[in-house]
Image (tube, grey):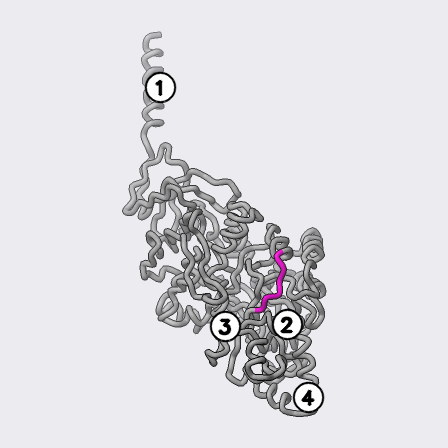
Amino acid sequence: MKHRIYYGYIAIFLLLFAACKKQKIEADILIKNGTVYTGEDSLPKAFNIAIKDDKISYIGRADGVEIIASKTIDAKGLVVSPGFIDPHTHATTDLSNPELSDNKPFLYQGVTTVTVGNDGNSPYPLIKYREKCEGHGVGTNVVLLVGHGTIRRMAIGNTDRKATSAEIEKMQNLIQVEMDAGAFGMSTGLFYAPGSYSDTEEIIALAKIVAQNNGIYDTHMRDESTYSIGLVPAVQETIEIGEKANLPVHISHIKCLGVEVWKQSDSIIDIIETAQKNGVDITANQYPYEASATGLQSAVVPRWAESGGKDSLFVRYQNPKYKEQILKETRKNIGRRGGPETLLVVQSPNPDFVGKTLLEISEALNMKPEETVYKVLEAGYIKIASFNMTPYDIANFMDEPWVVTGSDGGSGHPRKYGTFPKKYHKYVKKDSVLDLGAFINQSTSVTAEILRIPDRGKLKKDYFADIIIFDPETFQDKATYNDPFQLAQGVKYSIINGKISIDEGEYTGERNGVVLKK
């Protein structure tokens, strides 16, 4: 009996000893004391995170674990989140430029992965672009899409006509090569030439190749207003492509552009959610601004007049046979955008135009606004911000769990520098359209699932260590329409593939991103 009691005490002692002995973990970086959002739900956690090499080696409570790290980050009072993933950017040329490839406009927003090749326009061939980026390094991870417009130009040129069966087969082969090079899917710019010259059947035929490669379909739809088929039919076309090609479809920068389609967001949400119930995998991204941005030519020039390229456009414009019709349609398109007073030039080879509206320029030149368009286009590429969306539709789309954050970030519009912090500061902190957990999920894990990026977008053991730490009191955009090149503030740390890119608010100079491959 005494022996049994003795051995019982030993067993209890051993259990207590095992319970008291902490598991030891060696790490490169330890993050502690932060308010952690993992991307898996909307609730904050009091977790410690250990990083070893490029992966998360431990995430959980501090009890029973001793983490020995080369660097410890005390995140008390700060939010710890997966790095933001931007599904739509125009960072293509920046990333291929050794002087700009650090990608700081996105880094300072908390973005750790950007997507390029959107709107149907991608670098070609992708393998060469990948090699160039890898040669000098990139500041963020990069997801590649193959652009339908790029492929169509190679097969057909800029001609406004239907593709032949032989040309479709050629485009299918070209897309397969780009998918083999690591593209995550295909993008279209059906609003822009030459994408606008294609019919739905052409897109479905090409999307089927993407589907065979487990890729996605990303689209700037054929119409976001009343330019051609209309906004609702454009959404329906996107759904049809998803159904018939049997692949996920993703609407870029979902919006109701122009007075004629304001408040159609209710109908569009119903259409999309009905399609989802019927088995269509359809999602969207959105930026939190009331002004869109695009080329002046793309915004107001009739597509038929562009056939053959810019030189052909000016030949037609100078021909009395076509000029009157071109000006008539241009005037109507300016009206769709809200009028010449709403079109602000943000980029131009002629600096005198920058910061002025089309109305101001036309008054200075003593010309009608529609005539002024062609005068200023003589200078080269003109980019405009177009103030033509309503807060109702922006907030309405934003509240949907299938709408993620996307910047559409390109030079001249503040969204390149401010999308993610603006969405947080205005729609989470000030207006309470979203809670913090929903904002983080829609900027991280949901986007990773849409793009089919494995092992990223969540704070989870054995996932890649793409992590940001930001101050919830100071995280805010600074870029404006008049001064769009101001870096955001409030990101204290950015860790990409386990390496620190922003340390105590300062860029380390390290390009820690990689070009991801499907």
Q: Amino acid at mark 1?
A: Ile
Residue 173 horizontal/vertical position (percent): 57, 74
Q: Mark 4 belongs to which amino acid?
A: Tyr
Residue name at image x 32 percent, y 25 percent: 17
Give the residue pinned by disc 3.
Answer: 355
Residue holding disc 1: 12
Viewer-nearest residue: 310 or 515? 310
Give the spatial CA distance, label 4 vs label 1: 95 Å
Q: Earlier in the sequence, mark 4 or mark 1?
A: 1
* Front of the two marks 1 and 2: 2
Q: Nearer the viewer, residue 40 or 260?
A: 260
Disc number for residue 322? 4
Which residue ends up furthest to the top in the rendered image?
A: 1
The first of marks 2 and 3 along the sequence is: 2
Which portion, as a residue range, is magenta? 386-391
Q: CA distance from mark 4 to mark 3?
A: 31 Å
Residue drawn at (58%, 75%) of the image: 149
Q: Where does the image place residue 95, in percent across and percent down from the top left?
A: 42, 68
Nearer the camera: disc 4 or disc 3: 3
Residue at the disc numbered 2: 339
